[in-house]
Amino acid sequence: MSQDLITADLVVLDVDLGPTKNDVIHNLAELVAKAGRAEASGLEADALAREAKAATGLGGGIAIPHCRSAAVTTNSLAFARLKPPVDFGAFDGPADIAFMIAAAEGSDDAHLELLALLARNLVRSEFTDGLRAAETPEDVVALVNAAIHPEEEAAAAAPAAAAAAPVAAASAAAEEKVVLVAVTACPTGIAHTFMSADALEQAAKAAGVELHVEPQGSGKVTPIAPAIIAGASAAIFATDVGVRDKERFAGLPVIESGVKRAINEPAKMIEEALAAAKDPNARKVSGDASAAASAQGGSQLSAGKRTQQALMTGVSYMIPFVAAGGLMIALGFAMAGFDVALAPGFRGARECAELLWADPTACAAAQAAGANGDTIGALIQAAGWNAGFMNYIGALLFTIGGAAFGFLLPALSGYIAFGMAGRPGIAPGFVGGVVAGTLGAGFLGALVTGLLAGVIALWMSGWNVPRWLAGLMPVVVIPLIVTAIVGLVMYLFLGAPLANVTKAMTNGLDGMAASGAGAALGLLLGLMMCFDLGGPVNKAAYLFATAGLAAQTTSSFQIMAAVMCAGMVPPIALALATTVRSKLFTEVELENGRAAWLLGAAFISEGAIPFAAADPLRVIPSMMAGGAVTGALSMAMGVGSRAPHGGLLVVPLMTNAFGFLIALVAGAIIAAIAVIAMKQFWPAKQPAVAA
């Protein structure tokens, strides 16, 4: 490592960095940048985006805002002893100690291990007491370096450990300890993952319990040995993301929670695990370890939370199919014209593609003879092979995009089931999605089949079966039975009613679009797209639009255009506002505003998150006002988009592209005026700047 993680110029003691955590993050980012280790605005934006996902206040007066960022050039730790303390969302009050962990993208495992050592020490009272008592920045640097470079202490402790080994062995022989295993994991995999691991280890040590923890962080993961798992009495899963290779723990009683509970209540979780180990009716990790199945039974999450997570899993896995397929379809239209798919009875570019693949000369001759229609034939005759080749490629792109788009319903249904039941749910979920499409039940049918398959597969995963059958359950028995049940239920009972509902919805949307009432729907979709800028409400509106594209109707194209247009408004509006009235924004916001032009043009609503995170009461209502106007105008003017993404890149492929631009400009101007007015007439208190 060429540079230390922390130096004296990255430490400030007993300073006022502002009244809010956003102010503290801003000033710590500036501190790291001043040391030549990062670009301030980028680091601040990434740290705020991480903060928006989950508060980084840990309790005990500690906060650890952190992120991985391309703006970081050298892995760094910035430290501030805050006076007065600042609220970082901890359960027990504000924090007087704040570490900013700034990790560069692509950091190697060695750097991540050092960061993990620091994170684990933050739950040790002797370490935090030392930080509070430190008189100079150099004292803080020395404490941190001792925590993240424990080699010397370990070497000094080795003789004592060797002398104590016989005593420990005798004690173990005298009294057999309960063995617990645990997995900790947070989305970033840098701080909370290791802090929760250390908190559980300390609580287990105090309780006289043998605990083996597997922190599944961003760096190298060292799995718990299979022999240890086999001898364990219970498992603890303290994670905010899925447990990797969860099937290894199949059959163990399990205690499950988010990662922060393990930091706040480690002793209680150890007690619950010990109680579960003695309870024959305790929830267990389902599946079979030898079969490498990854069922997610035994969860202690509420039914509502589990369903929400499953739905978001389905949406997240579906979107790549929709984006790739939709953009290829749009490119196919651009290269071969809409006749490639829409003209009834037209033997155009798609059939020309097949002939070109087999025999280009025959295709040209057939076109010239009028066998495949005059339009493509005239192009080939007028411009030769180039025109025919462009149509050929366009037709192929359309065909490939259509194939990708065909996975929309199966992927949505299959991964909803996967989100609920793990691998045993995938097959019945995918089959249910195909059946929903076959019966015309649309995305409503896919939602129903995904949930139905997931619930039944999850229930079956908890069955107590003989060991000889356990290995077949997740790979044969559960997929077979659940697929049959879901398919029969759809064909015999739910398929027709859901198809009728879907048809009624489609007809209703078509009627709204034709009558002009679609503007109200566009207004609602615009509000949803700008409410949380990439959060669940935004994703719900986007799912509604993309799933509707499968119907290939005028209204579905108009809804897609309204959603895309409204989603582009926030970053463009804030870019405009920072350009017009730069004095109302901080230096960091001005930098973010310059980047927001491109993000908005590409339909990346998240470009507005740094502004909303720093000033939600002024920014979000302003953006919602602009998004509502844009959505309503887009629907009212009949703008239609067959592409589900792309922003300005796909505007030439839209129906009434000029109307799309009018709606976008109008909404962006209104949102910009609103946010400028809010900041002008309702100014926020300016944060103090660190010395």
Image (tube, rainbow, N blue to C red):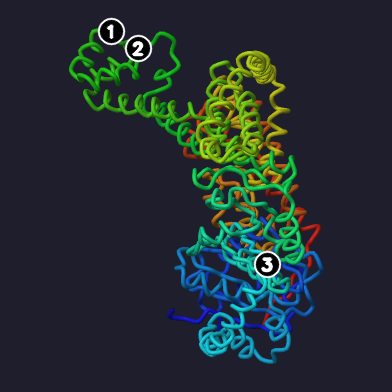
- Residue that numbered label 1 is attached to: 371
Q: What amino acid is found at the position of numbered circle 1 in the picture?
A: Ala
Q: What amino acid is found at the position of numbered circle 2 in the picture?
A: Arg
User: Can you say whether 415 is above or below 338 in the image?
Assistant: below
- Residue that numbered label 2 is attached to: 347
Residue 16, percent from left and from top: 75, 78
Q: Residue at x 65, y 29 (%)?
A: 452
Nearest the viewer among 413 and 231 is 231
Which corner quadrant holds the N terminus?
bottom left
Mark sitting earlier along the chain (1/3): 3
Q: Residue at x 47, y 39 (%)?
A: 649
Q: Residues within 10 Å of mark 3 (few under 14, many from 20)?
A: many
Tell me, yes or no, whether the two marked residues, 2 and 1, touch with CB atoms within 8 Å: yes
Q: Residue furthest front?
A: 174
Q: Secondary structure at mark 3?
A: helix
1 vs 3, front mark:
3
Distance Cα–Cα, label 3 vs label 2 = 68 Å
